[in-house]
Image (cartoon, rainbow, N blue to C red):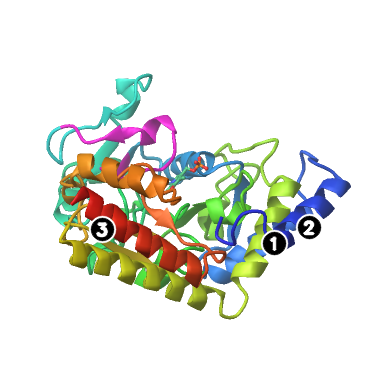
């Protein structure tokens, strides 16, 4: 909720839309309007298809990549989350070259073997997969700034390296910006790292709190989707007018001059205060952020890999988490989740959170 809960501008837009009709099972003008805003913010996006969730958007992006390239295999990264489509609920087996093993019951091995797993920030692990399976790989799907193994920042050259490998081997590069889009910057992580993917997947912020996902990309790829192309994709409630209204109203708010500067500055102040609290209490604890996407870690320095994220002191995190709850601060309930700063968080909230963290860290030292 990047603008805060129940923002009056969003509520008013939802109410107006609701009076006109809850659902039409057909495209509506607000859908086109939101698509146009996405196209303006993401230069390579010429077409947008809405879905009802991030899961559905990531699933459809995979199908589109597979249909477009006529290849079956996909590369994902251990610790990156793309919703609950079968092909994406897979993490590493042993070794970067191993075929994926499902990380959920109910995912057939026959499907999981088309998912190849690499290590985030380790370009060599991706090169090895392309060397062994290059002609089978339809796409590489990645959270450009992962927030689902807590926040990890891309190492310099890592995402550009993925771009180069995909172009060289005829695979599509898919950025899953469901979490980072409109949050680390208005133009998402791709704006900050200056790497252009083939397909982008969106969700969360663009629905303003209502169920939405979206896929965007160049016309040449997107027009492979039905009804123009052979890749089937549809949804009765996709682009639902209430969700579009909430999304558009949220976009109004975050596109206002100064919104992102304030979000970034407020989150920076929180992160600086948390880092100071870590230093003062001597606890191995730190924080970092990009825009309104932030991570705090039971580590002395921010992690750069899934393996480093796993080195956190989980027992200490649990005690810290409950201490913070007692203080009235509701953190994400896991050391592998990022947290979001919103436009509704003011200086007083930041100061109170830092003071609470300082007391909580002292208690768990
Ligand atoms: C939340 C998330 C999803 C899934 O979106 P849902 O709307 O929960 O289905 C996909 N990818 C990323 C990066 C996410 O953070």
* Of marks 1 and 3, the one in the foreground: 1
* Residue shown at the point (31%, 51%) measured from the top left: 150
Some atom of ligand 1 lies within 8 Å of the CB belonging to the residue at label 2: no
Q: Nearer the viewer, mark 2 or mark 1?
A: 2
| Closer-to-camera residue (125/8) | 8
Q: Are marks 1 and 3 in contact (CB under 8 Å)?
A: no
Residue 154, quarter of picture: bottom left
Q: Report x, y in % for residue 332.
A: 40, 46
Taking 131 as reference, is 349 left or right?
Answer: right
Residue 166 visible in the snapshot:
no
**Element marked by disc 3:** helix
Question: How many angstroms separate mark 2 from mark 3 (CA)?
Answer: 46 Å
Which residue carries the number 3 mark? Answer: 165
Of callouts 2 and 3, the N-terminal one: 2
**How many marks can you see?**
3
At 21% across and 36% down in the image, what residue appears? 92
Residue in front for this viewpoint, 66 or 141: 141
For residue 296, the mark is: none
Circle 1 sits on which residue? Answer: 249
- Name the residue: 21% across, 32% down: 99
Q: Which is more N-terminal, label 3 or label 1?
A: 3
Q: Give yes or no for contact between labels 2 and 1 (Cβ–Cβ under 8 Å).
A: yes
Q: Is residue 85 magenta?
A: yes
Q: Earlier in the sequence, mark 2 or mark 1?
A: 2
- Residue 303 horizontal/vertical position (percent): 20, 57
Which segment did they paint magenta?
74-93
Observer-nearest of 203 and 46: 203
Residue 361 percent location from the top left of the image: 25, 55
Provide the residue designation for mark 2: 12
């Amino acid at each position: 909720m990047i603008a805060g809960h129940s923002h009056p501008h969003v509520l008013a837009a939802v109410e107006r839309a609701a009076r006109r009709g809850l659902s039409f099972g057909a495209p509506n003008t607000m859908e086109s309007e939101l698509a146009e805003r996405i196209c303006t913010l993401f230069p390579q996006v010429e077409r947008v298809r809405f879905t009802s969730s991030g899961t559905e958007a990531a699933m459809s992006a995979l199908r589109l990549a597979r249909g477009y390239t006529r290849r079956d295999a996909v590369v994902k990264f251990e610790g990156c989350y793309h919703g609950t489509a079968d092909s994406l609920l897979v993490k590493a087996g042993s070794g970067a070259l191993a075929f994926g093993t499902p990380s959920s019951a109910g995912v057939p091995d026959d499907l999981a073997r088309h998912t190849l797993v690499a290590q985030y920030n380790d370009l060599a692990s991706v090169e090895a997969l392309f060397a062994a399976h290059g002609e089978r790989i339809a796409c590489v799907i990645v959270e450009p700034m992962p927030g689902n193994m807590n926040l990890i920042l891309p190492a310099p050259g890592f995402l550009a390296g993925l771009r180069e490998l995909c172009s060289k081997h005829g695979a599509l590069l898919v950025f899953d910006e469901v979490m980072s889009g409109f949050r680390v910057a208005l133009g998402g992580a791709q704006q900050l790292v200056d790497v252009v993917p083939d397909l982008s997947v969106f969700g969360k912020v663009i629905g303003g709190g209502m169920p939405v996902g979206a896929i965007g990309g160049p016309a040449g790829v997107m027009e492979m989707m039905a009804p123009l192309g052979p890749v089937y994709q549809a949804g009765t409630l996709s682009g639902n007018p209430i969700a579009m209204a909430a999304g558009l109203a949220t976009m109004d708010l975050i596109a206002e001059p100064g919104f992102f500067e304030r979000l970034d500055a407020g989150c920076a102040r929180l992160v600086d205060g948390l880092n100071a609290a870590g230093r003062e209490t001597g606890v191995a604890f730190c924080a970092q952020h990009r825009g309104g996407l932030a991570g705090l870690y039971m580590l002395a320095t921010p992690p750069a890999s899934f393996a480093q994220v796993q080195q956190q002191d989980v027992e200490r995190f649990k005690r810290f988490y409950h201490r913070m709850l007692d203080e009235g601060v509701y953190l994400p309930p896991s050391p592998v989740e990022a947290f979001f700063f919103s436009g509704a968080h003011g200086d007083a909230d930041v100061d109170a959170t830092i003071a609470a963290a300082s007391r909580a860290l002292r208690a768990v030292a």
